[in-house]
Image: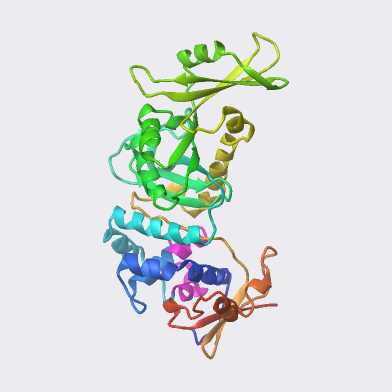
Amino acid sequence: MLSQKVSGTSTGLWLLVPELLRLGAWDLLKGWTKGGDMDFEPRIALQVVNESAICINRVRKKNSLGHQGFQLANGMGRLVTDEQVHSLLNGHTMEEAQDLMVHLGHQRQLSGHYGGDIIAIDPHRIISASQRVMAKKKKVPDSPSEKMLQTFFSLSAQTGQPIMATIASTGMPTTRATKDLLTATGKIIRTDSLLVADKEHFTEELLTTVNENSCFDILTPTLSNKRIKTLMEDLTYKSLWAGYAIAETPFSFRDSKEVFRLIAQRSGEVPGQYTYKAFITTSPRPAQELMEENYYDKRWSIEEFFRFENEMGMKKASTLNLNIRYGKLALADGDVRVNDDTIIVTFYRAPQHLNPNDYINLPQILQSENINPRIPWLYGFKLDFRFK
């Protein structure tokens, strides 16, 4: 296949190769599948990764992508079928998949993908087409209940890059799933960080767990119940600027001895027209710093991640299999050919956001970074790019 010239619209996948080499992705996939450089199983896993890169949940053998060189980027002469992918996934446990994610997270941490000390956490519920009998939930309050797959993500609020993801059936409580998420996240991020969460995480169990057993602190809004509303209205506030003031008080859940910090915000200038909002935190940072630095606003980075990455299989799930996939979308017209020991990918209309200097003479660039330019899943070929 490599001896034939291939032209198509999926040649942008080859732009992922240097990043996969930098992340050690092939070694991670070999470790997960327990396969070697010449085995088929790691290439099946790589096809799943590359499917995500072009925002397709499954690529069947009969799909037109099979005639555009998609299979070549995976080191294969053809696309594998749904049955082969499902068989591979079914042969591995969720614990093995989570270990794979942790190892990937270590590589990304070393590559500088996670900046700052703010981590956003949030569940993301995906409508499922599973035929299983399962509990139904509402994704939006006014919508009908549906079968759903629950995913739980943590990501760097500064860079917007995902750190860890876990998965659960609809019946898994948010608190329990979040505790599992934080345990896995803590294996990657080992420095003190502040978790920013939403009201679903306002539970005594989760706050106590973070307070007692975690290197993380947490900042989460409270529920707007009668008790907290009365508490906020009775506080003495410190004005920070016109129409905005904050106050702080100890807070305990009913029949609990655990004490947390409640920080309240008051907006408005006229008594009787004030509006309030309260947060619970385990952080020792001053209340004014937590509020003025807009730490909680950084949580919206995870909502942006969900919105922009929906097409990577996070909009609808056909099964409840754990199938965590990452990739970057980069598509352009071009062709693929071979010159001696090097695969040459030529782009005739490259995306404007690309810097050709990052890809031209790629073998030399990788060698300067102490990375072997020979691609193990492509039988030791090197890769280079041309732009016309």
Q: Nearer the viewer, residue 98 or 52?
A: 98
| Residue 167 coordinates in the image, percent (x, y) | 37, 46
Q: Residue furthest top?
A: 272
The vertical placement of 301 against 312, above or below, is above
Residue at (62, 35) in percent of width and height: 294
Query: Is 58 one of the magenta-colored residues?
Result: yes
Name the colouring of the figure. rainbow
Q: Quadrant of residue 237?
A: top right
Residue at (38, 67) in percent of width and height: 29
| Residue 49 coordinates in the image, percent (x, y) | 45, 63
Q: Is residue 260 left or right of residue 248?
A: left
Q: Is residue 44 visible?
A: no
Which residues lie in the magenta part? 49-74
Q: Residue furthest right?
A: 242
Residue at (47, 78) in percent of width and height: 375
Q: Is residue 263 left or right of residue 177?
A: right
| Residue 302 coordinates in the image, percent (x, y) | 53, 43
